[in-house]
Image (cartoon, helix red, strand yellow):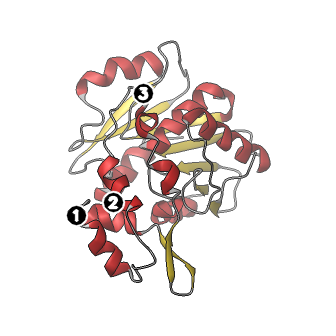
Amino acid sequence: MKLLNSLILGNTDRHLIILHGFLGMGNNWKTHAKHWSDMGWRVHLIDQRNHGKSFWSAEFDYSLMAEDLKVYLDHKAIEKCTVLGHSMGGKTAMNFALKHPERIKQLIVADIGPKSYPSHHQQILNGLASLDFSKLKTRASVDHALENFVPEVGVRQFLLKNLYWQEKGVLGLRINIEVLKQVGEKIGVGLQPNQKFEGSTLFLRGLQSDYIVDGDQLVLKHHFPNYTLKGIDKAGHWLHAENPVDFLEAIETWWD
């Protein structure tokens, strides 16, 4: 299998793997990674397949993405690590922990649960797929083209981090939009009823987000019996960016 791209900060044998969300990239977490590397972690900011600088593939599901992580850990000779995943990255992290529990020291899942979620990215994906880079030559023009599809300025700013210069004067997207626009329900698929991870697990929820609600605690306990749930005040789905102080504190008062 091909090897995922990563940015590594720190130089210890205490490994922290960070898995970004849908349409994101490892670099989105660079500020937190610098903080944690200063605390003695070797932080691996992973680009998942079809994202960032990692390889593109027509095949895209959580089983494959979990195996991508195993290949990465094997290549880096990492026997055991702490894994933090946000949203889609949290789904990958959960699937990896279930398949390879012996490789996980601690599992941290940010604002996503083991249940199924309906597809709700299609308008954003349609907007990204509609971008014509033969005509769009500046970041501002791309931003304007996305406005009709994505009215929220903050969401557009997040998406525009995927822009890069393919060559002089030619913009492109880091994400494989042709594949990602078709993934539909695969992004939100839930765990199978018989799947359990007995290891130490922290779930974080943005208290202004509806991805994890009070009624989900039964399903969390079913799949992850040794779990802790913490809420992050004044934060929605992008809890690590919206309230980084409380996000960091919630993790750092929990992990070993």
Q: Residue 127 got which mark?
A: 2
Determine the residue positioned at 58% across, 56% down: 47
| Quadrant in the picture for residue 187 | top left
Q: Marks 3 and 1: CB-CB under 8 Å?
A: no
Q: Marks 2 and 1: CB-CB under 8 Å?
A: yes
Determine the residue positioned at 32% across, 79% down: 141
Where does label 1 land, which residue? 148
Mark 3 and mark 2: Cα distance apart in space: 28 Å
Q: Which image quadrant: the N terminus?
A: top right
Q: Residues within 10 Å of mark 3 (few under 14, many from 20)?
A: many
Q: Is residue 86 above or below residue 167?
A: above
Disc 1, SS: loop
Looking at the rendered structure, the number of numbered marks drawn on it comes to: 3
Q: Residue furthest top?
A: 194
Q: Residues within 10 Å of mark 2 (few under 14, many from 20)?
A: some
Q: Amino acid at mark 3?
A: Pro
Q: Amino acid at mark 1?
A: Asn
Mark 3 and mark 1: Cα distance apart in space: 32 Å
Which numbered disc, 3 or 1, marks the residue that appears first in the sequence? 3
Horizontal and vertical percent position of residue 167: 59, 82
